[in-house]
């Protein structure tokens, strides 16, 4: 599955991330602490051509 949509709910310390494909089906959904956000984003970013 190729991610086409990444939604990020910003907060001070805890972030909610939702990744979906072109059909709108959930690929991944996580609740992350600030420290975990960059590693999660890096993992998806390396698999994607473009994040906009």
Image: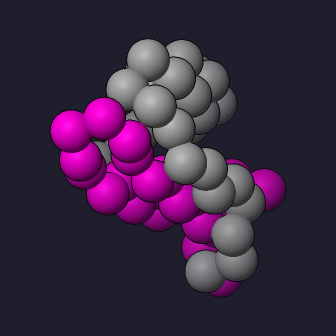
Res. 23 image quadrant:
bottom right
Image coords of residue 2 (percent x, y): 68, 53
Q: Residue at x 31, y 35 (%)?
A: 13
Q: In screen coordinates, is 32 left or right of 38?
A: right
Q: Is residue 16 magenta?
A: yes
**Residue 34 is at least partly visible in this image:** yes
Residue 3 visible in the shown view: no
Q: Position of residue 41 (x, y in %)?
A: 48, 29
Q: Quadrant of the N terminus?
A: bottom right
Q: Which residues are magenta?
A: 1-23
Say if 47 sits above or below 51 in the image: above
Q: How is the image coloured?
A: one colour
Q: Considering only vertical position in the picture, is 12 above or below 36?
A: below
Spot occupied by residue 6 in the image (x, y as percentages of width and height): 45, 56
Q: Position of residue 9 (x, y in %)?
A: 32, 57
Total marks shown come to 0
Which residue occupies the extreme right position in the image? 1
Residue at coordinates 45% horizontally, 53% vertically from top-left? 16
Residue most extreme to the front: 13
Vertical arrangement, residue 18 with respect to residue 43, above or below? below
Residue at 61% across, 80% down? 24
In this orientation, which residue lies closer to the viewer: 15 or 4? Answer: 15
């Amino acid at each position: 599955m190729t991610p086409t949509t990444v939604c990020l709910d910003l907060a001070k310390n805890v972030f909610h991330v939702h990744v979906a494909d072109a059909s709108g089906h959930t690929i991944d959904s996580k609740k992350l602490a600030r420290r975990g956000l960059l590693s999660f984003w890096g993992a998806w970013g390396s698999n994607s051509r473009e994040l906009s």
